[in-house]
Amino acid sequence: MTQKLRDRAVFATLSSPYYAYLLAMFVGVMLISNITGTKGVILFDDWLHVSLGPIQMDGLVTDGAFYLFPLAYVLGDVISEVYGFRAMRRAILAGFVVLAIASLCFWLTIELPAAEFYEGQEAFRTVAGVVPQFLLAGLAGYLAGEFLNSFVLVKMKERAGERHLWARLLGSTVVGEFADTLVFCSIAATALGISTWGDFINYTIVGFVWKTLVEIIIMPLTYLVVGWLKKREPSYQQALNEARSQTSDVL
């Protein structure tokens, strides 16, 4: 019983202004990533050539959101660790609504009749026409990945309490990123013009490995942000002190 009390997971309340800031950043990153991701990108194609049987990989295939999207999982980890699964569900719902509205607005804007003096209709349709498909891919991958990411992190915290934060951050990211990347790439690949299994596997593997590496590289920063928030959230400190007090009473 003593061990259970010591390891009890505690979270801050959702009324905090810090949570509102994190929520806004999370939704903003999701929206921007799903728009910039409509551009196909290839890196190191001048020297990186891999042949695995029928699969040919010339360079690393990714999209225009590769440098920003990993931040969504970092923010998701911070929200889940400090505020809990309920808070992350709210963030996911908010992101879902914003992405759905954005998808509808892009579709409607494309279909509106263009003015006679406007000469960019076809170019606009070509560029923005794939955005709804990307937003759909983002919604599907986002729901699968972020729910799994938050669920795994919170469940691990319920088992370990305040200990082993590094394991929670890494374990939840690997599970969430894999689900997100697989679902997203499966839907978005055709919008980028990916038509071969080699390019699809390249796109999926590069996305998963890259996002996981980013999480590992900036984990020290995530630690600092989580620690900073825990110290400055009165409701978190109160819940933590209550848990420690209960442990002392049992001892």
Image: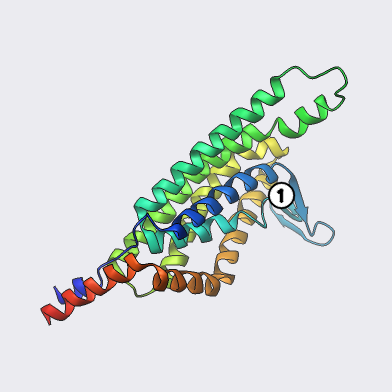
Residue 167, located in which quarter of the rendered image? Answer: bottom left
At a point 46% along the width and 50% down the height, the residue shown is 146
Residue 191, located in which quarter of the rendered image? Answer: top right
Q: Is residue 95 left or right of residue 113?
A: left
Percent from the top left, x then y, of residue 196? 70, 40
Q: Mark 1 points at which residue?
A: 64
Q: In this view, does 132 lie to the left or right of 13?
A: right
Residue 94 vs 77, above or below: the answer is: above
At a point 85% along the width and 59% down the height, the residue shown is 46
Residue 215 vs 245, above or below: the answer is: above
Helix, strand or loop at label 1? It is loop
Is residue 166 visible in the rendered image? The answer is no
Is residue 181 visible in the rendered image? The answer is yes
Percent from the top left, x then y, of residue 199? 70, 46
At a point 69% along the width and 33% down the height, the residue shown is 130
Quadrant location of the C terminus? bottom left
Residue 213, located in which quarter of the rendered image? Answer: bottom right
Choose between 95 and 20: the one closer to the eye.
Answer: 20
Residue 204 vs 7, above or below: the answer is: above
Percent from the top left, x then y, of residue 160? 30, 71
Amino acid type at mark 1: Gly
Residue 194 vs 159, above or below: the answer is: above
Choose between 231 and 54: the one closer to the eye.
Answer: 231
Quadrant location of the N terminus? bottom left
Choose between 223 and 11: the one closer to the eye.
Answer: 11
Within 10 Å of the Cα at label 1, are there few (<14), some (14-19), or many (20+) other Cα atoms? Answer: some
